Amino acid sequence: MTENNTHRRGYYREFVSDLPDYVLANRDLWDASAAAWVAMGERAWTEEPSWGIWGIPESQLHLLPDHMTGMDAVELGCGTAYISAWMARRGARCVGIDNSEKQLDTAGRLAREHGIDIELIHGNAEVVPFDDASFDFAISEYGVAIWADPYKWVPEAWRVLRPGGELSFLGHHPLVMVCQRRDGGDDVTRELLFPYFGMHRVDWAEGDDRGTEFNLPISEWMRLFDETGFDVVSFHELRSPSPEEEVRFHIDAGWAHDYPSEQAWRLRKR
Ligand SMILES: C[S@@+](CC[C@H](N)C(=O)[O-])C[C@H]1O[C@@H](n2cnc3c(N)ncnc32)[C@H](O)[C@@H]1O
């Protein structure tokens, strides 16, 4: 394995001064917290695919095509790029794009150590440097799926997919946004604290490690998919496998056994 196996294009047609405030703030946040995600990334690179906070197995969710030989795949907000590794092992040619150079440093090192060829690009995945219809498959697990504006990244993912190409993504369920205080570090509650309708940009408290996220009411996600040109292949509202698990990422397992803590979508471009 040589250093050349992983390519870094650096910045592309992105000028920092043009980036939205939340992309810059989330970049600082992820550069600052990347070290805390190294161990998890290293572990995920060695494991079979499983998803989200509760590690739901791929055999239950089917977020990846079974066979990816010869497919062009892009991971939008790839972080340490373990999903790209899973896709590359299924035969795909993979590109990972991420807003944090520090996260990409980890991804690049792991790609070299595992002998897996992934093209890694630093940038805002709301606007990607690819021609129309460049990919067969796009995916995001807690990447653009929560950190980017869906009115930007969903049409952009559609643009770079080929007709019949698929987009899978997983992130917080919008109910979590309704039931969590935003003034710092609190776990999800059983109270309805914020309106569900009208949900879009969610700014967590300054100094919180959650920066700015985005989410939509389920019916609004569906309207966006339909108007963009995606059909829904599958939709899952995820629950914790047992109420006895520990609190993970501010989500109590008992809460997540009673209410959906995550959403997972698989879409197909018309
Ligand atoms: C929780 S990680 C998810 C990635 C991967 N599943 C993981 O856990 O390593 C979130 C990633 O999204 C990236 N991100 C946030 N906003 C982004 C944007 N606008 N474009 C591309 N990546 C973004 C962050 O830099 C971070 O690496």
Image (spheres, rainbow, N blue to C red):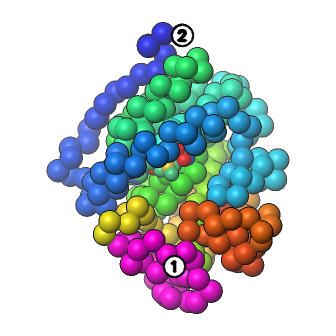
How many marks the image carries: the answer is 2
Disc 2 on helix, strand or loop?
Answer: loop
Mark 2 to mark 1 CA distance (whole Å): 45 Å
Residue 97 can be seen, yes or no: yes
Q: Which secondary structure type mostly characterizes the magenta part of the structure? A: loop
Q: Residue 109: x and y, percent?
A: 47, 25
> Is residue 142 positioned above or below 112 on the image?
below
45 vs 228, left or right, is right
Disc 1 on helix, strand or loop?
Answer: loop
Q: Which mark is residue 1?
A: 2
Instruction: From the image, tell me which residue sits under label 1.
Output: 180
Give the residue displayed 45% in from the left and 71% down from the top. 185
> Is residue 58 positioned above or below 54 on the image?
above
User: Of all residues shown, which one is farthest toward the left?
Assistant: 17
Please name the amino acid that badge 2 sits on. Answer: Met
Quadrant position of the N terminus in the picture: top right
238 vs 143, left or right, is right
Q: Residue 254: x and y, percent?
A: 72, 75
Q: Residue 122: x and y, percent?
A: 36, 37
Q: Residue 153: x and y, percent?
A: 44, 55
Q: Which residues are magenta?
A: 177-205
